[in-house]
Amino acid sequence: MSLPSLKAAHSIPPHTLTRLAQQWLAEDTPNFDPAGVCVGSQEVEARLLCKTPNSILAGSPFFTAVFTEVGCTVDWIHQEGAEIGPNTITLIAVVRGPARCLLLGERPALNCLARASGIATRCSQLQALATVGGWHGEVAGTRKTTPGFRLVEKYAMLIGNVSMHRQDLSGMVMLKDNHVWASGSITQAVKAARSVCGFSSKIEVECCSAEEGREAAKAGADIVMLDNFKPQELHVAALALKTEFPTLLIEASGGVTPENLAMYFSSHVDIISLGCITQGCPVVDFSLKVQKPVAH
């Protein structure tokens, strides 16, 4: 589903990169930088090293944007989406610029790269499981993202070759159990949502049984999420719904982990979403090492 890595980076508007980089830098250095006095503005070179073998590189647009804001340049040796090899330490890029400025950008830039690469790596692993299992549906993320950091995390899903799912509440409509309980019924909730979103947005309904899924489909839902179903129960319910509503999309969610993902694969299941893509996902270990001047 995802875009090739080079094209994915083109989906981020330049002004968005600039805005985010400025926000991250302002958060990390809200006023003085006393340590900057120690190093001054002499030109230095630093090497970006990856210390987590077999990872996927993601987040380079954000890394570059941070250093651009502080007047530094980045020369990438490995490109976005690259698979980092098995070596214990791999040289990824070289950063050049005034010492104090380079060190201002170091931590915000590394944080973006570490988080994005960790998510992309997990996504790539999940997609590999789907490929091996012969499943042709979409592995998808969720809105369980870090506040203020969603764009980076959703972008990392693209690099990892899985679906981002919806971006926010303004996108695709998802009616969860609380929406249904507050409105009175699935039918009423779908009707009310459709009156606002019209033809341009899909409506998804979270369902706890095949009966609820059937009501949602009859009410005009485009997608039914079968939530917290055990794998065997999921397959039975998905088959029943697909038989009656062939164009209905079926999503499985709740309780899905990298360890049990394959148990949810079915020709009747179109989407499997996992909160663990962003929650509790390990980061990739990067470091930035300034090179000592060579004595002549």
Image (tube, grey):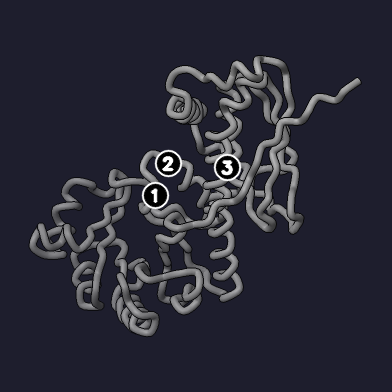
Q: Is residue 80 above or below residue 183?
A: above
Q: Residue furthest right?
A: 296
Q: Is residue 123 rendered to the left or right of residue 86?
A: left
Q: Residue at (58%, 63%) from the top-left corner? A: 125
The residue carrying mark 1 is 145
Local crowd at mark 2 within 10 Å, few (<14), some, or many (≥20)?
few
User: Residue 179, which numbered label?
Assistant: none
Q: Is residue 128 rendered to the left or right of residue 242?
A: right
Which type of secondary structure does the marked residue at label 1 adopt? Answer: loop
The residue carrying mark 3 is 113
Residue 266 visible? The answer is no
Local crowd at mark 3 within 10 Å, few (<14), some, or many (≥20)?
many
Residue in front for this viewpoint, 293 or 93: 293
How far from the left and from the top, in percent, is residue 19?
45, 26
- Spatial CA span between label 1 and label 3: 16 Å
User: Residue 149, which numbered label?
Assistant: 2
Q: Is residue 116 above or below residue 204?
A: above
Which type of secondary structure does the marked residue at label 2 adopt? Answer: loop
- Spatial CA span between label 2 and label 3: 12 Å
- Spatial CA span between label 1 and label 2: 7 Å
Residue 199 visible? The answer is yes
Q: Residue at (58%, 59%) from the top-left corner? A: 124
How far from the left and from the top, in percent, is residue 181?
12, 62
Question: Image quarter for residue 238?
Answer: bottom left
Q: Are marks 1 and 2 in contact (CB under 8 Å)?
A: yes
Q: Earlier in the sequence, mark 1 or mark 3?
A: 3
How far from the left and from the top, in percent, is residue 261?
48, 73
